[in-house]
């Protein structure tokens, strides 16, 4: 019971964090658009969606266990670190850096839940939604700057 309550609190916290990041839009710097970052975020979101879909189908089976998917987490973590390094290379890119930290935190939460064992689809859904919200916020921010430059 305590574990379920703790899990619910984590999911709620991630949801609120994603909501705050999505709704807050400080004035960003000019020339903040980066095609590589935009494309990378799109790929990360796609990979996460495919991963969640696969886990949904595997729920309740041996193949749904964390040990079978550790490489996915390692790969996404490395890609996020690379994106963070790229974001840090641009001046006045604090907004993107904050979003990438939130994305990394969401991935970490998904991994923690996976290690504990997914018990139902609801926990997958909420984490997927949090991941998608942050990806959407980054994409919107990037596209806004792309069109502001033109």
Image (cartoon, rainbow, N blue to C red):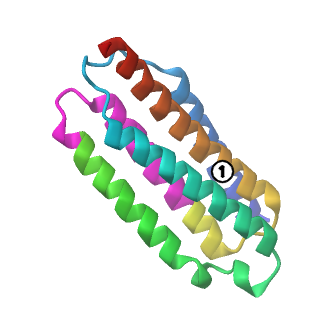
On the image, the x and y values in percent for residue 25 come to 44, 18
32 vs 81: above or below: above
Tell me, yes or no, if residue 30 can be seen here: yes
Question: Which residue was labeled with disc 1?
Answer: 128
Res. 13 visible in picture: no
The N terminus appears in which quarter of the rendering? bottom right
Find out whether residue 44 is within the magenta segment: no
User: Which residue lies at the image location 45% right of the left edge and 45% below the top edge?
Assistant: 41
Q: Relative to residue 39, is residue 150 depicted above or below? A: above
Q: Which residues are the magenta region?
A: 88-109
* Helix, strand or loop for the magenta stretch, by majority: helix
Q: Position of residue 93 (x, y in %)?
A: 26, 30
Considering the numbered disc 1 on the image, is that residue within a helix, a strand or a loop? helix
**Spot occupied by residue 63 in the image (x, y as percentages of width and height):** 71, 83
Q: Position of residue 29 (x, y in %)?
A: 26, 18
**95 within the magenta span:** yes
Q: Going by the image, does 108 lie left or right of 145?
A: right
Near-viewer residue (112 or 6): 112
């Amino acid at each position: 019971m305590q574990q379920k309550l703790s899990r619910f609190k984590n999911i709620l916290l991630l949801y609120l964090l994603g909501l705050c990041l999505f709704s807050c839009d400080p004035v960003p710097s000019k020339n903040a658009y980066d095609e590589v970052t935009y494309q990378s975020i799109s790929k990360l979101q796609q990979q996460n969606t495919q991963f969640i879909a696969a886990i949904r189908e595997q729920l309740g089976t041996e193949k749904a266990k964390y040990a079978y998917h550790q490489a996915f987490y390692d790969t996404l973590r490395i890609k996020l670190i690379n994106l963070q390094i790229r974001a840090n290379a641009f001046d006045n890119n604090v907004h993107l850096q904050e979003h990438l930290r939130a994305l990394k935190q969401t991935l970490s939460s998904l991994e923690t839940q996976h290690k504990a064992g997914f018990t139902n689809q609801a926990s997958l859904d909420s984490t997927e939604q949090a991941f998608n919200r942050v990806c959407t916020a980054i994409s919107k921010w990037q596209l806004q700057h792309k069109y502001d430059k033109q």
